[in-house]
Image (spheres, rainbow, N blue to C red):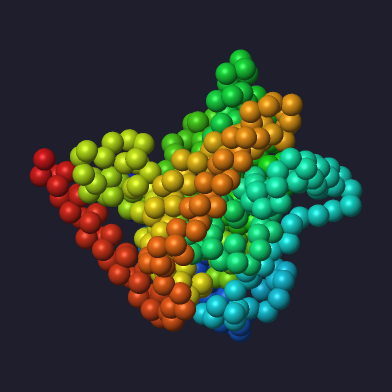
Amino acid sequence: MLLRMLWQSEDLESVRPKTVSSIAGWVGSAFLFGIFVHSIWPYAHLLSSAVMVILALALIVVWRAKRFSWLWILAVCSAFCWMGMWRFETAFKPYGFVPFTVSGLAQTYTSTSAKSGLFFIVAQARSGMTQRISDTFPKDQAVLLNAVLTGDDRLSKPVHAQFQRAGLMHIVAVSGFKVTLIAACIIPLLLGCGLSRRYSFCIFTLVLFVMVLFIGTHASAARAAFMIWLYELAPLVGRGVRASRLLLVAAVVLCAFQPWLLLFDVSFALSFLGMWGLLTWTSWMREQLPKWVSDPWRSLLAVTFGATFATLPYTAWVFHQITIWSMVSGVLGALLVPWLMAFGWLCVLFPQIPFAPGIVSYLLQAMYVMSAWPDQIGWGCWMNVNVSWLSMLAGYVALAWAWRIVHMRTVLKKVST
């Protein structure tokens, strides 16, 4: 309502052609900035009081001098910045966090559970599925298949470290990649059954909600689910789709519920950094690859390189490890995981199909073989890397600077042609 009032005001004529969506981007960024400030400064509630005073003064000045319409945007951004600090101060936090330290991050998760209602039904279905998989496959394969389908990572510590060195953790953990694979198949399937887009979207929303509950409300899964939900909603309300704006909206919504995610959650950071890499570096990577590399390999390589570059400084800081195997395993895993998930669900839902368990078993063995490559070759993975948070920040500054140069060259090339 406040944004609508401000936009309809004649005082904003001087800032057009700025649109409401661009102003919304500023206020969303201001909200996240407020959470960021409070995350690194435990006494930010003192600052929030100062922001409220500045906000009040800005509103008075704007009301008295309407020609300074840019102050409206400053006032609204100040309000949302204060809301971000207030939200962090009032939200429940699992335990104390320490900014800019790996030990202060939230790296452990617990599955959503309840003793009644929908949560109980989902928990029972999850337990029955796990038991059916355990009865069908050997122990090591059953554990890996459960991790792939539900994100229930019960791999032993040596195997878990092996998959981490190979860059395959996005396969065994809950990731936006797997959520996107499932969600992207739902709407076409419903439309193929003859349902209208509106009814298909309603069913899609319910299925997406249950799916996130089933695999656990992790930040990466919630981010992917919310972004693809907004993507399917946009045509129904007559709005265009812009991936960067969807990413910002997803960050604001998730941080509104759990503001500590912004700075202290590994899954949240990797999910958004990976998505940022896809949005920024993928198209440039496609152009740099040799012409003889055709799709789907060209797209897979570009997506894998973009996500790897964007997450490399953060993973080096958090896990003290640098691996280039994620570029190889990411491409091969992206080809194998859809088939593994498809035949894995066939084994769970239709156990009478004779050929499905054999195919799943071969695919699981291929995953274990891929995870052992770094140890067998003895190169491409560097452990115990000491990276400070300042070095991590410098890495992202360098990436942003490099991207700006690449982007400007691309723009100049398009203009010249």
The spot of residue 293 in percent (x, y) is 26, 40
Assign the C terminus to one quadrant of the image.
Answer: top left
Q: Extreme top residue here?
A: 194
The one nearer the camera, 402 or 144, is: 144
What residue is shown at x 61% (from left), y 84% (from top)? 43
Image quadrant assignment for residue 407: bottom left
Residue found at x 41% / y 47%: 331
Residue situated in front as seen by the camera: 385 or 362: 362
Q: How many marks?
A: 0
Q: Looking at the image, which residue sits at the far front?
A: 376
Question: Do we see residue 22 in this rendering?
Answer: no
Left or right of 172, for residue 377 = left
| As drawn, 261 above or below 353 | below
Q: Is residue 71 above or below residue 246?
A: below
Q: Is residue 140 visible?
A: yes
- Which sits in the foreground, 24 or 97? 97
Percent from the top left, x then y, of residue 5? Answer: 53, 50
